[in-house]
Image (cartoon, coloured by chain):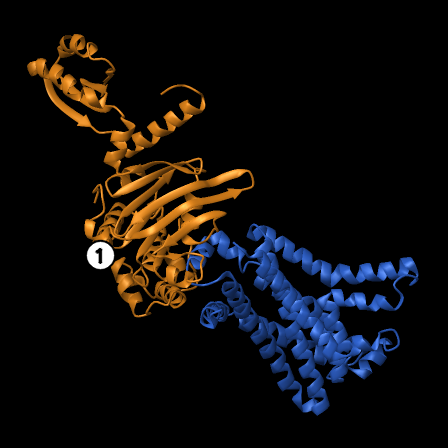
Amino acid sequence: MANVSPPPDRAAAEAIRVRGAVRHFGAVRAVDGVDLDVQRGEVFGLIGHNGAGKSTLFKMMLGLIEAGAGEIQVAGHAVNGRHFRVARRRIGYLPENVVLYDNLSGLETLRFFARLKGAASHECPALLDRVGLSAVATRPVRGYSKGMRQRLGFAQALLGAPQVLFLDEPTNGLDPQAIRDFYATLHDLRSRGVTILITSHILAELQERVDRLAIMASGRICALGSVAQLRERLDMPLQFDLTLADGAETSLTPGLSAVPGVSTTAIEGGVLRLHVPRQLKMQVLGVLCAAGPGLRDLRIVEPSLEDLFFGLRHRADMAKDGVPS
Amino acid sequence: MIELRQILTVAGKEFRDRMRNRWVLAVALVFAVIALLIAYFGGAQQGQVGFRSIEFTIASLVSLVIYLIPLIAMLLGFDAIVGERERGSLDLLLSLPITRLELLLGKYLGLAAALTASTLVGFGLVALVLSRHLNWSGLYHFGGFILSSVLLGLAFLSLAVLLSVLARDRTRASGMAIALWFGFVLVFDLLLLGLLVLTGGRYGGEAFPYLLLLNPADVFRLLNVFSLDDIRAMYGLASIVPPALANPWWMGSAMLAWILAPLALATWRFRP
């Protein structure tokens, strides 16, 4: 799923278009002039630390919070404009930790939301089947586990075949199999041109599943692109894990110390970890080749999304303190 | 433009919820049992048991209903919006093609239907049991009592929904609801009376009785007590209350204002 660009045939129209979106709460600039385009059929991640503004932006895109300035369109319509009902019929939303109505059964819950959304009520049993809840469709929701409630919430989000799905921490409470099924469903939806905007604190989960993502800080988007693009742009070091034969470390050290910017960390089990500037990768590989049979194994690890996130935050903190990065 | 369908969908869900958890039935039974006890045993203190007159029954019921219905309405409506907010389902509802006004009206109408059904069924049962004692005039007065009880419930429900919009969480909302009930039902009249005694009636003059309109519970009392000549005489109030306050249409309008004003305020506050 981690393509750099959305498929070209779907790239014609933006599913979400944000221009100069601003929202202040008193002196706090929760969202401070955000521009963002999410293309049709794209899986887009929105991440940031608590208070970065992502929840406010997310809610602004859903029309739950009005923008102080700027323009937000979803599926071709302003979410709070004259045609807001058209826009919202094209939206599916799964809030974080949603608690649905205990008195209603799963089927009744879906029928209630289907009526409000103007979706056909005959969709409901099929959707419950899709999320694996058909066996408990007539049981009151009060008897559902957290994972079952989350799946019911997801089924609700899929009512009316939405063009844009907003998912807030969607895998909360799901077991590993359910998470796998959930992402398989997203993959299927994406292939049908559904746009998916997803927020999660589990960055490892997003890393392989989003086409692009935006990292927010202080109400602004501070990084935007695919994970690969962000790696290049942030120029974070690669991690080399070397499994060495006894005594090989001493023969490697002079060569490695001659390469500027390489730092080493010894870790357990005869593994040496190097942090290598991206542009020096080939030079370090050359040194390692010279080590001969002393080098038993080599693993090169790209910085994870989590590394990128913290790297970016570290740079922002340093910039704030006036330290050149 | 308002879509009636959305309002009715929300209202229908709210009403079915209360039917399903037997709230409507339980409250109707409470109303019926209490009203029957009052009708047949209300005169026991004077050594009389059995039905006396509809005027006496209504006068006794007014004293009770004035406490009971506002409390039930408050308990019914205090978490209408704040409960959804706390559950996290409010954002979900508002992301759908429904306006805040439609959601608020739907919530209010569903709860109002449940409260009205309880009141009508509870007191309707009583009217059925008492029907052999009642002539047309008695039935008319009891019908007026039931209608005013419904209006009283709707007015306090409207206040409860307003609190539900204003409160940050359910705990605060429930505290505010109880405080408001206490204020209107117990404190307000005491304050007025205290003010009257303190000033010796020197200030306000003829306008003073109109302060009763500031309390929906008092409007309910005025509607019932002053609509019956026998009761007016019984309370000895005919001479001190201006004629406008004895006019059921004016008082009915005042009650409608008490329903609409808090709802309008709630709508205004329930903005994004």
**Which of the chains is blue?**
B
* Residue A214 percent location from the top left of the image: 34, 39
How many marks the image carries: the answer is 1
Residue pointed to by mark 1? A192
Seen from the viewer's position, the closer of residues B132 and B238 is: B238
Numbered disc 1: what chain? A
Quick one: label 1, few (<14), some, or many (20+) residues within 10 Å?
few
Seen from the viewer's position, the closer of residues A43 and A157 is: A43
* Residue A88 percent location from the top left of the image: 39, 60
Vertically, is A17 above or below A4?
below
Q: Secondary structure at mark 1?
A: loop
* Residue B70: quadrant of the picture: bottom right
For the point 59% across and 54% down, the residue is B166
* Residue B155 percent location from the top left of the image: 65, 68
**Which of the chains is orange?**
A
At label 1, the amino acid type is: Arg
* Residue A317: quadrant of the picture: top left
Vertically, is B224 above or below B183?
below
For the point 28% across and 37% down, the residue is A204
Q: Is residue A321 visible?
A: yes
Position of residue A142 in the picture relative to residue B129 (left or right): left
Position of residue B238 in the picture relative to residue A87 (left or right): right
For the point 45% across and 63% down, the residue is B98
* Residue A34: quadrant of the picture: top left
Position of residue B142 in the picture relative to residue A59 (left or right): right
For the point 23% across and 40% down, the residue is A208
* Residue A60 percent location from the top left of the image: 44, 49
